[in-house]
Amino acid sequence: MDSSKKGGGIGMLVVVLGLITFVCALLLGLINGVTKDKIAQNGIATRNAAMGEIIPDAEFTDVEIPADFATPADKNQPVVSGVYQATVAGQPAGYCVEVNPKGFGGALKLIVGIGADGTVAGAKVTEHGETPGLGAKAQSDQNWIAQYAGQPADGSLKVTKDGGTINAITGATITSRAVTLGVDTAANCIAALG
């Protein structure tokens, strides 16, 4: 076989694969551009619904995030991505904090309510990449997540394996610790507001 024909065939193959890759990348870019705003709107709707469940009948107002919580110096500390003051019938009812602790499968998105009485009003996982049937229970098992409600919002919560009062999800201690750290971070963030 002539080596020049063989080289030409490989060159043509490279060109065809390059064109296919370019077209796929272009289509993915277009789809991302079309869906980006809708995804953001869905995220806001999910966040607002979670806040409404945690502190019912409240109106929420954005509050500036303390700098130490928006960009923590310690990379193991969760990032706070939103703080919202809650008022019910014109009276302060507490805060909801959107915090992003790192779980087993990556970052979780967690909404934590801190009541005006200094206790945790509730918590809700709104987004995760945890293992189905294990860490994913942080979102789906309402009985498990309900144990945070009524706990002191003083940043001292721990899972029972670490000497605390929070029962970990069986087989998902890392996720349980992440949610607990997220709740503690939210409490500390509200305390920093003064």
Image (cartoon, rainbow, N blue to C red):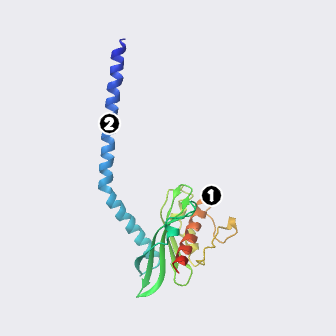
Of 104 and 64, nearer the camera is 64
Q: Position of residue 87 (x, y in %)?
A: 43, 83
**Amino acid type shown at disc 1:** Gly
Toward which corner of the image does residue 78 lie, by quadrant?
bottom right
Residue at the extreme right of the image, as rendered: 163
Q: Is residue 2 above or below residue 25?
A: above
Q: With 16 as the anchor, is 191 left or right in this view?
A: right
Which residue is pictured at 58% across the width and 67% down the height?
Answer: 181
Q: Position of residue 157 (x, y in %)?
A: 63, 72
Element under label 1?
A: loop
Q: Are marks 2 and 1 in contact (CB under 8 Å)?
A: no
Q: Which residue position holds label 2? A: 20
Q: Position of residue 28 (x, y in %)?
A: 33, 47
- Quarter of the image with the N terminus in it: top left
Which residue is pictured at 53% across the width and 73% down the height?
Answer: 189
Q: Which residue position holds label 1? A: 171
